[in-house]
Amino acid sequence: MNQRRESRTAANQSVWVTLYEAVETRICGRIRNVSGRGLGLELDQRIGVGTAIRIDLEDSMLLGEVIYCRPETDGVFYAGVELEQALNGLAALGEMLRGFSDEPSASEPADAVKDTRGQHE
């Protein structure tokens, strides 16, 4: 009997996984299935239960916690991850932030902002 609260959808997506442990480590993984609250990761090493992780996809970043990790076959491990946060549209966000850079716009002269310290003494 399946006791999951939400159904899972099969996936096959390569991702980078950053482990936030005593030493931050980045490893390659593969998402095997997803649900609204979590996902299943295939990895080539065991990850400790309770480890905070970041999963980087093409235009998204997922933050979560490993809730179990079990060995499978041929040195492969399967980790269940409970998702905490998901950030999507990172390319568009990066483009928007570049618009707020320190470089002056074409309509604003580079010396428009001057240091006025000491002028009123």
Image (cartoon, rainbow, N blue to C red):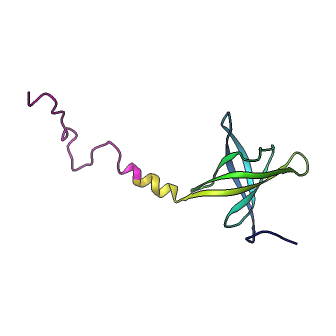
The percent position of residue 95, horizontal first and vertical second, equals 43, 53
The percent position of residue 44, horizontal first and vertical second, equals 81, 45
Q: In this view, does 86 lie to the left or right of 78?
A: left
State whether residue 105 is above or below residue 34.
above
x 82%, y 69%: residue:
3
On whether residue 102 falls in the magenta region, the answer is yes
The percent position of residue 85, horizontal first and vertical second, equals 59, 57
Closer-to-camera residue (17/1): 1
**What is the quadrant of the C terminus in the image?**
top left
Closer-to-camera residue (115/107): 115
Q: In this view, does 47 lie to the left or right of 65?
A: right
x 27%, y 44%: residue:
104
**What is the quadrant of the N terminus in the image?**
bottom right
On whether residue 103 falls in the magenta region, the answer is yes
Quadrant for residue 41, please give it.
bottom right
Q: In this view, does 101 lie to the left or right of 82?
A: left
Quadrant for residue 62, please give it.
bottom right
The percent position of residue 61, horizontal first and vertical second, equals 59, 54
Toward the left, the furthest residue is: 121
Q: Start and end of the magenta stretch? A: 97-121
State whether residue 71 is above or below residue 82.
above
x 70%, y 57%: residue:
82
Quadrant for residue 112, please give it.
top left
- The overriding secondary structure of the stretch rendered in magenta is loop
The mark total stands at 0
